[in-house]
Image (tube, rainbow, N blue to C red):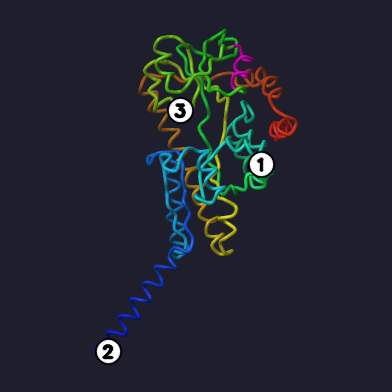
Amino acid sequence: MIKQVVTGAMLGAALIASQATLAADFTLRFGHLANEQNIWHQAAEKFKEEVEANSDGRIEVRLYPNEQLGSEMDVINSIQLGTAEMTITGESLQNWAPKAAMMAVPYAFRDSEHLHAAVSGEIGEEIEAQITEQANLVPLAWFERGPRELTANRRVEHPDDLDGMRLRVPNVPLFVDTWEALGARPTPMAFSEVFTALQQNTIQAQENPLSLIESASFYEVQDYVNLTGHVRSWIYVVIGQDALNQMPDDLQQVVRDAAASMQDYQAELFVEDQERLEEALRERGMEFVEVDIEAFAERARPAVEEALDDEQRALFEAIQNL
């Protein structure tokens, strides 16, 4: 009897060990730049939860926020080398897939609904196909990003109101050319220098999503959020094509289903976060100003089209006609 109990215990232990071994048939190392409070990371946690539950533990998802695996480009390179599997990335993908430039083109999209229609339809499929083909990365989900808005110490309702305004922009030639066409004096500058430059009046304005306007405390040195919405963009959650293809079909479906849930979850969080950000900035004393979007888009368009290559320009036109 004792022998049977011991044998049973040994078999049980062996079974548990066997199950533990099977519990990590596949590991997805998922690195990104956002911190743990960011809605991107919250969405990633949702993905991890669903994948691990619905794969019966056969897939383990390890999350690495705060650039723990390196910068955005570092993680993409790691995925291509097989030392990571997933990340969240944006227009950097144009280094491999030129059509991904559409992810940050000024006035490509009229509003959020227009962006959703493009990314969820044939245009999005075209961009994603090129990313997979040329970067060996499979877009699993996409997240809308907050539109870039212009902050200043004066109201800007029309491009004429810019009138040589000294405006900080990131060091992106397309952004520089666009703001010059709009009548401003764009000044490329590191983000870390912007607050002091505004405080000292070295520059008079800057442009960024509401999330960065809040986190950088620009409300302390800027009075107005002028709702230019000049760049509406999105970002992809990607997985290495080789990593995905190594999984059997049923587990690939688990990953794709969890990614769809993650996308829906982030979309809900995004709407709530945008509302929270606007309320928080108003409470800090910032005034929100409606602008003549059509006037801005019309004046910016020649500079935008000139900066695009033939392939990108064709895609831009398709978006405009959507």
Tell whether 121 sits left or right of 16: right
Q: Amino acid at mark 1?
A: Ile
Give how far across and how far down residue 92 sits, in percent. 57, 35
Q: Which residues are magenta?
A: 175-183
Camera-nearest label, 3 or 1: 1
Tell whether 268 sits left or right of 256: left
Tell whether 11 sits left or right of 241: left
Q: Which residue is mark 2?
A: 3
Q: Which residue is mark 3?
A: 210
Residue drawn 70% across and 20% down?
Answer: 302
Q: Is residue 260 above or below residue 203?
A: below
Q: Mark 2 or mark 1, which is nearer the start of the sequence?
A: 2
Separation of residues labelled 3 and 1 (CA atoms): 27 Å
Q: Is residue 85 above or below residue 216?
A: below
Provide the secondary structure element on which disc 1 rests: helix
Q: Amino acid at mark 3?
A: Leu
Q: Is residue 70 above or below residue 190?
A: below
Q: Is residue 22 magenta?
A: no
Q: How many other residues sit within 10 Å of disc 3, few (<14), some (14-19) or many (≥20)?
A: many
Provide the secondary structure element on which disc 2 rests: helix
Which quadrant of the figure contains the N terminus?
bottom left
Give how far across and how far down residue 221 sits, in percent. 39, 15
Residue drawn 47% across and 18% down?
Answer: 151
Question: Which picture quadrant has residue 173?
Answer: top right
Q: Which residue is mark 1?
A: 127
Separation of residues labelled 3 and 2 (CA atoms): 69 Å
- Cβ atoms at labels 1 and 2 below 8 Å apart: no
Q: Mark 1 or mark 3, which is nearer the start of the sequence?
A: 1
Camera-nearest label, 3 or 2: 2
Which quadrant of the figure contains the C terminus?
top right
